[in-house]
Image: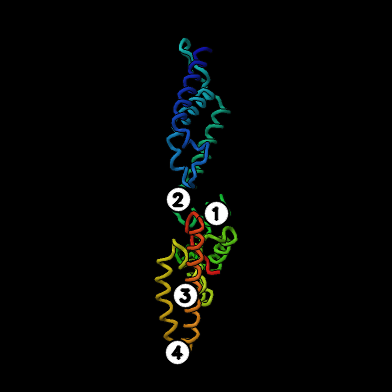
Amino acid sequence: NDYTRCNSCLFVLFHLSWMFTLFPISGIVKVGTFIADRIVVASTVSTSILLGCYFHQSIVGPSSSQEQKKPRIRLLPSVVVLSLLSYMWYRVHVRSMQWMDNHQLLLSSLKTCPRCAKSHLEISKVYSGLIPELFDLDKSLYHLKQVQSIDDSYCDVHRQLAHVYIQQQRLLEFEEELAEAILCPFDMMGAHDMWNKYWPVVLQDPSAREDGQRRKHGYELKISQAVVREQEELEKGKPQWKGARLN
């Protein structure tokens, strides 16, 4: 009837007017962040009101201002709504549990986006000792290799590789990755501290001192040359320093 149609139009107009002001964060367009679900809550308010009215009419049936009769509950729409609410409850419950567990959240992230270098890097930290019960260096190294296969210019990976290699006693590979990490602007300070702690221990051993000094000098020379190359690239117009490479 006319009353029902008018009522429905008003609800739709209310929803559209609400969404118009919130369109940039409605979730319809990308906002450039993986935590967009935190900022779309406001736009779901009017959507929930509109859907609630629609489901009410589907279950109870249209009402009129002239006719006051006892509404009849429709079975099929009721089952659909209850199924939808149960599914939504399950999704919210699972997602809430994931946000409370770093490991599960990262697994969920990799399931959603398997080629996310950042997620592979973060979960490698979990397996390399961040959570002792999940300690597994082979898994950690696997995820770090995935990072390099996705983006070989992602310099944050080198310090984590060094952390894994030192635990595996793969010292030559550790030294190489640590030298690379020193050239990464995001890990430079931490890598430099590790560098200053590592070499005095190596050079304490008289039998390994000469070879250690040779390796240390070689890495320092490569680091200096890499910095010079990067400075030349910046002078040529490279937009931003994102880290140099040894080779």
Question: Marks 4 and 1, Cα distance to the nearest angstrom?
Answer: 45 Å
* Residue 80 location, quadrant: top right
Question: Marks 4 and 3, Cα distance to the nearest angstrom?
Answer: 21 Å
- Amino acid type at image mark 3: Glu
- Amino acid type at image mark 4: Pro
Q: Which residue is mark 2?
A: 99
Of residues 184 and 117, the one nearer the viewer is: 184
Choose the circle earlier in sequence order: 1 or 3. Answer: 1
Question: Marks 2 and 3, Cα distance to the nearest angstrom?
Answer: 43 Å
- Of the two numbered discs 4 and 2 in the rendering, the one whose residue sits closer to the viewer: 4
- Of the two numbered discs 1 and 2 in the rendering, the one whose residue sits closer to the viewer: 1
Q: Are marks 2 and 3 in contact (CB under 8 Å)?
A: no
On the image, the x and y values in percent for residue 208 come to 48, 86
Choose the circle earlier in sequence order: 2 or 3. Answer: 2
Choose the circle earlier in sequence order: 1 or 2. Answer: 2
Instruction: Look at the picture and state if 134 lies above or below 75.
Output: below
- Amino acid type at image mark 1: Cys
Q: Secondary structure at mark 2?
A: helix
Q: Which residue is mark 1?
A: 116
Residue drawn at x 48%, y 33% is 23
Q: Which mark is residue 206?
A: 4
